[in-house]
Amino acid sequence: SQQGEEDPQALSIQEGENATMNCSYKTSINNLQWYRQNSGRGLVHLILIRSNEREKHSGRLRVTLDTSKKSSSLLITASRAADTASYFCATDAKGGTASKLTFGTGTRLQVTL
Amino acid sequence: NAGVTQTPKFQVLKTGQSMTLQCAQDMNHNSMYWYRQDPGMGLRLIYYSASEGTTDKGEVPNGYNVSRLNKREFSLRLESAAPSQTSVYFCASTPWSLAELTDTQYFGPGTRLTVL
């Protein structure tokens, strides 16, 4: 079953605007990651936030994590047409002796000129 | 570094045919994974190999087998393909270790498989 659920499923904005997408998950986690997928390509890692962190920045990306609500958000500031892609959150559940990520269903972002 | 490579890029099979999807990574990663991606479903884990010599089932293993040939290579086999296995298949790897718990995954470009 899917651990993460992204919201919204699709988002259309104009270049220069900010894009916010949300992820909810079900179980306790070691970390939460965000990935981007351009159409027809493999996923590319964007950012990782650990369960003991609340906010993290990387360039135009800002990720927040609220473990009490089991939710995360990804903010892309000053979006560009090149940001058009699908974005997935992925969680690594606590415990176990191997890394297994569970991916959400993704948010499709369209950035228009 | 080529990263994670997958072959073939595209494949069309008839129901009942068999095939092997190949995956290789040149990053000396310990763990490797096979996912399938269906429209609107995100990625689902088929099988994974935490380290050379070990393999384990993921969320959707039925109809598939895997082999971790060595540290670099991890293959996925469909013994008798079914239309329900039409999907895009991705291989991934990570340097994950219990000591570091750093499990960013690196993905290959995918294989588009159609089963008629």
Image (cartoon, coloured by chain):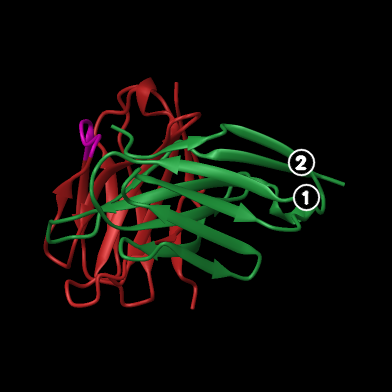
Spot occupied by residue A1 in the image (x, y as percentages of width and height): 28, 32
As for residue B60 lying within the magenta part, the answer is yes
Q: CA distance from mark 2 to mark 1?
A: 7 Å
Instruction: Choose top left, top right, bottom left or bottom right for residue A32.
Output: bottom left
For residue B34, side relative to residue A97 (left or right): right
Instruction: Choose top left, top right, bottom left or bottom right for residue B37.
Output: top left
**In the image, farthest residue toward the front:** A68
Looking at the rendered structure, the secondary structure element under dot 1 is loop
Mark 1 surroundings within 10 Å by alpha-carbon count, few (fewer than 14), some (14 through 19), many (20 or more): few
Q: Which residue is mark 2?
A: A13
The image's mark for residue A17 is 1
State whether discs 2 and 1 lie on one chain: yes
Q: Which residues are magenta?
A: B59-64
* Residue depicted at 23% across the width and 59% down the height: A99
Amino acid bearing label 2: Ile
* Residue depicted at 41% across the width and 62% down the height: A54
Chain B shade in the render? red
Chain identifier matching the green colour in the rendered picture: A
Above or below: residue B99 compared with residue A62? below
